[in-house]
Amino acid sequence: MSISKTNNANFFKNKKVLVLDDCQIILNATRLMLVRHGCAPNNIILVKNAKTALSACTTHKFDFILCDYNLGSGSDGLQLIEELNKKNLLPENTVVFVVTGEMSKSVFYGFSEYEPDGYLIKPLNINSIVTRLINCYRQKQVVKKVRNTYLKEGKQSAFEMCKKYEKAPAVAYIKARIYEDEKDFAAAQKIYINLIKNNDSKARLLLATLLLNEKIYDMALKVIEPLIKDKKFRFNALQIQSKCFLKQNKMQDALDALLAICEISSNNVERLLCVYNLSLQLDQSDLLPILSNKINTRLTNSIWNTVDYSLNSARCHLICAEKEQDPLKRNTHLMEFKKRLKLTEKQFRLSDYQFHRDLLNCRFQLLNGKIKDALAIYQAYLDENQLKTHDFYAYLDEQHIMQSLGKKREILLPPLTTSDLDLTKKSLLNSQEQFQRTRDNKITLLKREAAMASQTDDFISVVNQWLAIWELKPFEINSALALIKSFSNALPMSVPITKLKQVYFEANQTVELSLSKAQRPLWFVETNQNVKQAIDQLETHSCH
């Protein structure tokens, strides 16, 4: 049944409305239509950008928010809604409608996880949406009244009030939520199951969420399974599925679910960062540049726009170069690293990015085998930076550097929470610790095999073992000495001369920088000279 303008006048009389659009003409027209329907002019706030809207929501509590998606320059409507949610500036009883000139799948699902009350397609006709606004508002008021009664007078009084609103669609959900608050999960499940029997898919989502929160992950996954192939609910179902997998430490399954969500909508920076961390952990480095590009397109003007996150666009190419065996592809990644680093530096003040940049440049020099330059950068970094608490990716950078250079210093991370993003960070840290333990065990085994081969004068095996050790953990002084000594007995013809020269250069530099001439073994000078001559001769021979 339609609601006439006369009936609407009293309804809107004391309601506060925020209208957000970058077009002044649309703002004025919307304001005029609201006034005609009884809204007091001083209760309507018009804003043209997200920053002003955020400020308005900080100082006012609105009954209605009409939020445009495309706001021109600056944050878009989705970024605003995300920030309002993060900062708890959206009361449960505020009616939020998203206004857009296009209803693309990406826009719809981008907003859907923040559960707006509806979507409006431009051009707006306020007469056609008044009924929707009023119905949404009244439904939320029912929820508010029952919740307030429950909080003030208890469960029975709240349930008595529910009887007055038996026909309201939300009443069953309200009762189930009260049972959840009372820790009576069996009663809440019973309500949801009865609703599911009537093909209520929202109840299925709510039941799966309840099971997820109660750590009954397998059951939650089973409940949600029918919705994974349902186009309407697939997005929300995949969200619950990915959370279950993260909690179960099934990281490959979690990555697959998150990638499926990103195929539907790639607007959420936090989710993209989760995918980035899991790709890093699972050694799927080919995904990192693609992900970092997607992240960077959404970072600007968002709450996630920090130096640490922004530098992933450069950092990911450094990581790819560290893993790449093909010299041409490796150089391509290094060139892209330099380009991205310069682009990021233009976005921030020197004081904000300097330490992050120094750590990345140190990694860059290590990757190129320039240990002297890497040490100089790291020492200058230590002289200037006394902070022990790091941003997450900067923490990983310094850990990598310390392991490579054999340095030790206590560095800390801010406390990690139970959010999905922090779960992926914890998992990445745990996997790296496991990798280090595995690597150290492998090095111990290789050293043992080298010692056994040395006893039988199997010099080729000895040098191959030390090359493998150097590949796992370069720039370690004892390994450098052992490697040069093994080169004096044999040079493996199976290893390209360019690789041998690079490894020898790194080992020799490590000795020179780690030990003074007086500290070096007596055999070193003559042996080192012989090795250098042998490698030079081998290079000359290979050229002919």
Image (tube, helix red, strand yellow):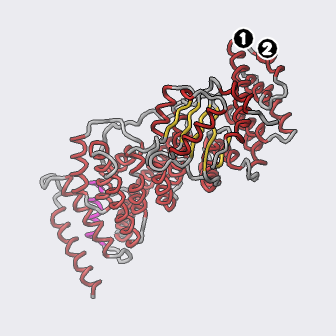
The magenta stretch spans residue 212: no
Quadrant of res 211: top right
Identity of the residue furthest to the top in this view = 153
Q: Position of residue 513 (x, y in %)?
A: 19, 54
Task: Please tell me how crowded label 2 is: few (under 14), some (14-19), or many (20+) other residues with Cα within 10 Å.
Answer: few
Q: Position of residue 358 (x, y in %)?
A: 28, 50
- The correct choice, above or below, for 60 with respect to 249 in the image is above
- The correct choice, above or below, for 453 with respect to 32 in the image is below
Q: Which residue is mark 1?
A: 153
Task: Please tell me how crowded label 1 is: few (under 14), some (14-19), or many (20+) other residues with Cα within 10 Å.
Answer: few
Q: Type of residue at label 2?
A: Gln
Q: CA distance from mark 1 to mark 2?
A: 8 Å
Q: Say whether residue 256 is visible.
A: no
Q: Position of residue 200 (x, y in %)?
A: 81, 40
Whether residue 90 sits left or right of residue 537 in the image: it is right
**Region of the chain picked out in magenta, as a range:** 475-490
Disc 2, SS: helix
Q: Nearer the viewer, residue 287 or 430?
A: 287
Whether residue 311 sits left or right of residue 531 in the image: it is right
Disc 1, SS: helix
Q: Which residue is mark 2?
A: 156
Do the residues under discs 1 and 2 have CB atoms within 8 angstroms? yes
Q: Nearer the viewer, residue 28 or 168?
A: 28
Q: Say whether residue 433 is visible.
A: yes
Q: Residue at x 23, y 80 (%)?
A: 537
